[in-house]
Image (spheres, helix red, strand yellow):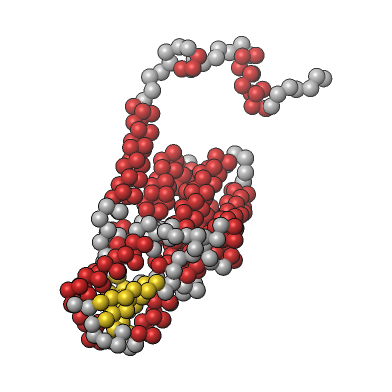
Amino acid sequence: MAPLVGSAPEREQSSPAAAGQATPRTPSSGGPGPRPPVRAWLQPAVIALVLAAAFIGCYVGLQRDPQPHGLPIAVAGHSLAGEIEHALGDSVSVRPAVSAGAAHQALERHDVVAALSDTGGRDRLRLEVAGADGLSTTTAVKNLITAYAGGSGKHVTTADVVPLAHFDGRGLAGFYMAFGVTLAGFVLGQNTLGLGHLLHLRHRFRLIAGVSAATGLLATVIAGPVLGAVPAPIVPLAFTLTLLAAAAAFTTKLLGTYLGPVGVPVATLLLLTVGNSTSGATIGADLLPAAARAVSALLPPGAAVRAITDLSYFHGAHTALPLLTLALWAVVAALLVSLRPRLRLSRTRALV
């Protein structure tokens, strides 16, 4: 017997012609074909326009007029704290400190974004900021205190006590790292959507977990030891970025699984557009509008940027909540994806 030539799909496609059946006419065969439905034109057009408007609106709109709101500032001395609170109002959230040393410690623990004290005289102030909080935040604090000092006839001396790494002059390395890992996780989740006929669900889960870990380690090594832009410890940072990649991948897979073709654009909007633009890296979280500020720490990119900053400059002072947020996104999304086949089976049985 002569061996069969070609793959199984190829043999299946050639069988109708071999049996003498007529080949159905398609638009690519030269004939007029059926008229495409309006949805075929409308859906991709609307998705493209929505994504373009959302991307530009978020990234440009959030930076057009950032206003400080509740910037946490440690102020040494009850009298000075009262004056600052009265003069600056809702722009700051004054945290009274018993001494200049206590205010300094609050800044080093990342409980506040600045520490203010008088330096031996009521007409001289010392402002300590953390450059690691980003240019937008430190600039806003300096402008507020300078305005207060100018109106009160006082002189301000400013010191950056938590400066940025030498190779991260603008404080954007953490943002770009989070953006890159989020993008990698998004692409990974998108690609696994088309592997259902090739890989079992548990194998797709293992693929996402393995590639997420590799992505987190690769990003850590490049931004840390190789480029020297992110001075966080390797193991905690790699773990954080692994959770971010897994959260992005499983969330993308979840939305694609439940929403179909619209799921990937929704994931793009949620993770790459809203998530990254409100992460608090390019514009400090305390300078964002109220709506953006509310979702900033709840989305994976925002949680990751906070964890990267704390690990890099503040000895991991407040990393527990961001890591929990990332883990919840990854675990809950994976759980819902795993439940999808059972839900389909239950629905099928109910219809029968």
Q: Quadrant of the N terminus?
A: top right
- The residue lying toward the viewer, choosing from 62 and 156, is 156
| Figure disc tally | 0
Residue found at the far right of this picture = 1
What percent of the width, then of the height, locates residue 229?
A: 52, 60
Give how far across and how far down residue 177 sits, in percent: 49, 55
In-image side of 236 versus 4 (left or right) = left
Answer above or below: position of 266 versus 136: above
Q: Residue at x 52, y 49 (%)?
A: 184
Q: Which residue is at 40% across, 53% downward? A: 276
Q: Position of residue 248 (x, y in %)?
A: 48, 53
Quarter assignment of residue 67: bottom left
Position in image of residue 187 (x %, y %)? 51, 45
| Relative height, residue 302 to residue 47 (above, below) | below
Determine which quarter of the picture holds residue 147. Answer: bottom left
Instruction: Please indicate, yes or no, whether residue 269 appears anywhere in the rendered image.
Output: yes
Q: Nearer the viewer, residue 234 or 251?
A: 234
Q: Residue at point 35% right, 85% down? A: 100
Q: Is residue 220 among the parts visible in the rendering?
A: no
Q: Is residue 49 above or below residue 114?
A: above
- Identify the residue shown where x is 54% and y is 47%: 188
Q: Taking 101 as reference, is 205 left or right?
A: right
